Image: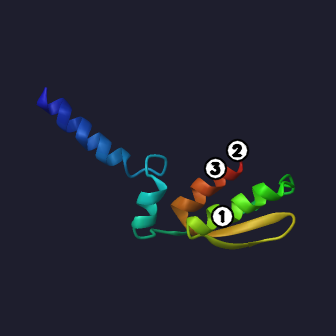
């Protein structure tokens, strides 16, 4: 019984290092591991409130970048770039 519990603890510790299992707060507190960049086509984003949300989220997550009417480029911690991209394409 105790072997299974230790194995579960190890699996939980190993699983916590995946991007999906880490909270944004944990990522922001940790050191950036890799610089990430993403380019997103945003021709479908016409709503000004959605554009404000995109900028607000990038600022909160300390992501830099630039945009024009057709695309945005973000850069920062690779893990946050992945999470940001996932949110934007939903």
In front: label 1 or label 3: 1
Dividing the picture into quadrants, the one containing residue 51 is bottom right
**Secondary element at image label 3:** helix
Quadrant where the C terminus is found in the figure: top right
Q: Earlier in the sequence, mark 1 or mark 3?
A: 1
Judging depth in this view, the residue of 3 and 54 nearest the camera is: 54
Q: Is residue 45 above or below residue 65?
A: above
Residue 32 image point, x, y percent: 45, 70
Q: Residue at x 48, y 57 (%)?
A: 24
**Secondary element at image label 1:** helix
Mark 2 and mark 1: span between their CA atoms?
17 Å
Q: Earlier in the sequence, mark 2 or mark 1?
A: 1
The residue that mark 2 highlights is 90
Q: Residue at x 18, y 38 (%)?
A: 6
Mark 1 and mark 3: span between their CA atoms?
16 Å
Residue 89 image point, x, y percent: 71, 48
The residue that mark 1 highlights is 56
Left or right: residue 54 compared with residue 83: right
Q: Residue at x 38, y 52 (%)?
A: 17
Residue farthest along the top direction in this orientation? 1
**Secondary element at image label 2:** loop
């Amino acid at each position: 019984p105790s072997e299974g519990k230790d194995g579960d603890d190890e699996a939980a510790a190993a699983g916590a290092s995946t991007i999906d299992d880490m909270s944004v707060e944990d990522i922001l507190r940790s050191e950036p591991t890799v610089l990430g960049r993403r380019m997103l086509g945003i021709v479908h984003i016409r709503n000004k409130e959605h554009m404000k949300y995109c900028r607000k989220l990038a600022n909160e997550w300390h992501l830099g970048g630039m945009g024009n009417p057709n695309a945005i480029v973000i850069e920062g911690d690779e893990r946050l770039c992945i999470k940001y991209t996932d949110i934007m394409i939903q």
